[in-house]
Amino acid sequence: MLTPFYRRLADVHGGYTDASFVMLAPIAVTACCGLSLASNFRNGSPRALWPYVGLMAVLVYGFFSGALQNGLPAATLAVLNWALPILFALHILTAPEDADEKARQIMLAMVWGGLVIGVYGLIQYLIMPAWDAEWMRGSALESIGAPIPRMVRVFSTLNSPGPYAQFVSASALIAIATRSRMRWGSIVFSLIGLLLSLVRAAWGSWAIALVMLFFWSNVRQKVAFVATALAAILVITPAIAFSPLGETISARFATLSNASSDTSYLERVDLYRRFSSTALSSIAGVGLGRTGVISARLSGQSPGAIDATNNIDSGVLEIFYTFGLFGAMFLVMFGAIYVTSWPDRSNPYGVAAMVVAVSCGPLIFFGNPLTGASGMLLYPFVALARLNRGRTDD
């Protein structure tokens, strides 16, 4: 959650670069999870592991295909981006001892993290620190607004509003589901951050996950759930309505009822209309390393040649475009990790983990939540749900 923030601080002194060595830190740390798999793989349940193994098999194909078509550097960067979240999930599944304690520690970190990045997101919106403004100018990401106060789609300590919205959404869900001591601060600032990200897909997926959390709860939990929701509404509504935040959020909400004039919606519809035939007709796929701005540059494409084909706002289309027919296998395995991980309702950690995973899943139609920071929410939390569903079927 914090590495992009440290990178921006480093850029203030060293100057902006497209690829910063600071961003290698989480990659190196997560890669260490692979060291435990050789000795612990047999400890995992075969039924829980096989979908992840299937996903890794597709990535191996995508890597070799990408290395041939796009170059080894681009394919290597891309396969790390796709594979490391799956590797971390496998690390969780192959170390099943103390499952509740592991889930508790991870979720406590998420609750605190949501509070921290939610507060910083509010500061970013109202003040716009110099390091964030410099990074926005250097990266030239026009979709996240202007580098001035109250004109930005909040991304807080992350690289873009999308992953930020997913993290604060997850934090608020966990705080509600587990009733952490820090839940009030985390819920309030996480939800304000979610709204200021202006990511409508994340708003909708969070609402779906919230409804599922309600129906998974027992009667006592439902009462506490409703009380928490009402209290949060009473705090957040005046904070937004009578502050500079209200106008920005209200304008974004208004676009939900007027799709015909919504540029973002029309562009996504046009993407599906224009690019679906290209993606679905790609039998062998273009391999890993073709999509993503950095990967595209590493594969030798000039900045002027980088367009929507490289930066695809649909995980489904990107999967088929990258892996070809193997993309169907990838989606089957992806669905299987949900089906095999449905939690025991009596386990609060399993339920909390699953609602987080559910809040990420629908975003596959609006972007790619399977890679990088977004993937580190989806795959590990599905794994936590599987680990905390009980051992009777293992």
Image (cartoon, rainbow, N blue to C red):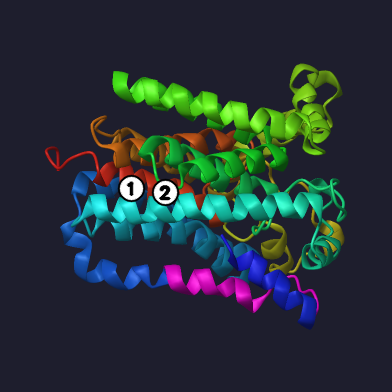
Tell me, yes or no, if residue 371 can be seen here.
no
Name the spot of residue 271 as percent of width and height, x first: 74, 35
Q: Give the residue displayed 58% in from the left and 43% down from the top.
A: 190
Front-lying residue, 10 or 26:
10
As helix, strand or loop, the secondary structure at mark 1 comes to helix
Residue extending farthest left = 392
Magenta-colored segment: predominant secondary structure? helix
Span colored in magenta: 15-30
Residue designated by label 1: 383
What's the distance in space between the residues labelled 2 and 1, CA to CA? Answer: 6 Å
Q: Give the residue displayed 27% in from the left and 48% down from the top.
A: 50
- Marker count (numbered): 2
Residue designated by label 2: 379
Relative placement, left or right, of 19 versus 27 is right
The amino acid at mark 1 is Ala
Q: Give yes or no for residue 230 being in the magenta stretch.
A: no
Residue extending farthest bottom = 14
